[in-house]
Image (cartoon, grey):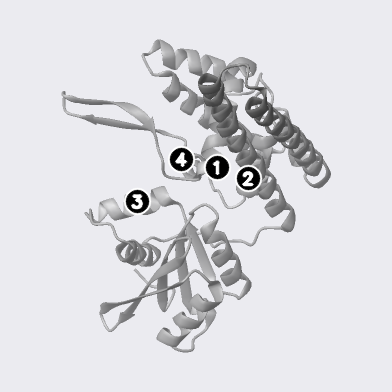
Amino acid sequence: MRNLYTFYVGVDVAKSFYVVAILSIEGNEEKLRSFRVEANPRAFEKRLISIIGSCKRTDLLIIMESTGPYHVGLAEYLSRQGYHVVVANPFAVKRFIEANMSKAKTDKIDAEFLAKFGMHVSDHKLYELRSEEEKKVERYIKLIEDLKEKLVALENQREAARIILGKEDKDILGSYDRIIKELKKEIEAKERELKEYLKRNFAREYRLLLSIPGIREKAIGVILGVMRGFRGFKSVKEVVSYAGICPRVVESGSSVRQRGRMNRRGNRLVRRVFFMCALSAVRANRYCRELYERLLSRGKSKKAALVAVAAKLLRQAFGVLKSGMPFNAELATP
């Protein structure tokens, strides 16, 4: 295979540091170098250049996995500096590693496989800088999700206190109640702000996606803010893979039959939001309800059926945005 780049740089991204592998071809052999650096994009760039020397930025392909918020700062910085950056789907990288028969897992090995993935897998989609509006929508979504997690934790703590102290202890329980009430008001306020922001900045896309029964503002925000309106995705299969919304089935021979589990690779935020949307869609969306009931009748678990419904919603959203036409129940595929 003809190599398009002089250097392939794999970056295993963590909260506090980057582990980096540099792969190049010298003669007929691959040369591999590695280093570790603090999680600072400028420090990364400085260390990288000190090792490979001066070269055109387009001579490097820098590959990292999508790792929640930690990869974003590095990918954005490098793209603005003119480097070619790939944010790889973790599921695709995992399959590449498995195909190369590797079971060992360390940060250094992961970085090396990312570099090899960049060199040996063709047709990479380069990272595109997101607009300020897309980033703002994502921050709204994450804030709302964080507040809801805190609300659930507080409600659980309040219930534990009630069991221990009894109903009559109004001092402690009253404090919980006041905080819970204020937190609910803040969540409602942020959800209203998100709705208005979407209507103001993404009017066309908002209108199209809202036509799908079961899709509401939070899911629309995920599609537009996190997945950038599906720009960069060539097929709905790539979208579902990116989200990690697909049941993982373990079967072997006649004796191994494990219950399917949701694939944990992919974007956790997308997966969580669309799984919750599936709960509404089985009531509001006829095709999702039919799919859910059909899978249950075949002996699938409720969770596996909901995973399939979540994937169905993503497919419907993909079709609506790509076609530019509102959802039409008469044209939808069962």
How far, Cα to Cα, is label 2 from label 1? 8 Å
Q: In the image, is 153 to the left or to the right of 302?
A: right
Q: What element carries label 4?
A: loop
The label shown at residue 278 is: none
Residue underneath mark 4:
244
Disc on the earlier residue, 1 or 4: 4
Q: In this view, does 136 lie above or below 53?
A: above
How far, Cα to Cα, is label 3 from label 4? 12 Å
Marks 2 and 1 in Cβ contact (< 8 Å): yes
Query: Disc 1 vs disc 3: which is toward the camera?
Result: 1
Q: In this view, does 279 lie above or below 75?
A: above
Residue underneath mark 3:
94
Query: Disc 2 vs disc 1: which is toward the camera?
Result: 2
Q: Is mark 2 on a helix, strand or loop?
A: helix
Screen quadrant of the N terminus: bottom left
Residue 241 location (% of width, % of height): 46, 42
Residue 37 location (% of width, % of height): 43, 74
Residue underneath mark 2:
142
Q: Is residue 114 above or below residue 228?
A: below
Asked whether the viewer can see residue 250, the reply is yes
Residue underneath mark 1:
269
- Residue type at mark 2? Lys
The residue nearer to you, when weighing 59 against 176, is: 176
How far, Cα to Cα, is label 1 from label 4? 10 Å
Marks 2 and 4 in Cβ contact (< 8 Å): no
Q: Which residue is drawn at 50% across and 82% down?
A: 46
Q: What element carries label 1?
A: helix
Disc on the earlier residue, 3 or 4: 3
How far, Cα to Cα, is label 2 from label 4? 18 Å
- Residue type at mark 3? Lys
